[in-house]
Amino acid sequence: MHNSGRVTITSIPKENRSNYMSYLIQADENQQMINTYINKGELFSIREAENTVGAVLFIPVDEQTIELKNIAIDASSRGKGIGKAVIEAAILLFKEKGFSTLIVGTANSSIENIVFYQKAGFRISGVRKDFFEDYPETIYENGIRALDMVMFERKISEERRLDE
């Protein structure tokens, strides 16, 4: 369990991860795609006070890089700083584990996400062209077809811990 002051993230065991599908599907509309990664990395419940308000999944890319694969917060709890608090808690957690970079990708059509990640300290690091062409259903957001994944990164630490 990691606490950022107002938000707590608690690790979810693999056998209970399917209980959080209703959250994960808010951020990735395709359950078939979620099933390809739900049991990888670390899934956390997001709690504010006594209420579960979302879920977040991180998957290691390599020894230095961790990917924020999915984050979803209840619609009624959005816009209150919870997402940013989750990212700050994760930064502390993964810094302790020796990671130096946190990455995340979102669709070119996800305008709100693009704004959110930049406000949370991420910088654009690349584009994965045609990423969403493999999705079984065509996705449109904000009147824009989701085709490319915009990648962001945020440095966690310039140095890795030597004891990891």
Image: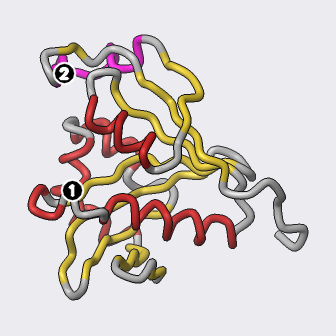
Residue designated by label 1: 79
| Residue 106 rendering spot, x and y as whole percentages | 38, 32
Q: Is residue 113 left or right of residue 39?
A: left
Task: Report the span colored magenta.
Answer: 130-141
Marks 2 and 1: CB-CB under 8 Å? no
Numbered disc 1: secondary structure: loop
Q: Residue at x 20, y 15 (%)?
A: 144
Residue 124 position, x and y percent, is 54, 29
Look at the image and tell me in which quarter the C terminus lies. bottom right
Residue that sits furthest to the front in the current view: 119
User: With respect to residue 27, does 136 lie above or below?
Assistant: above
Q: Quadrant of residue 20?
A: bottom left
The figure's colour scheme reads secondary structure
Question: Which residue reaches farthest bottom?
Answer: 50
- Given the image, on which type of amino acid does mark 1 rest? Gly
Q: Is residue 30 above or below residue 121?
A: above
Q: Which residue is mark 2?
A: 139
Comparing 75 with 60, the one in front is 75
Q: Where in the figure is residue 104, as x and y percent of width and height?
A: 48, 41
- 73 vs 93: above or below: above
Q: Amino acid at mark 2?
A: Ile
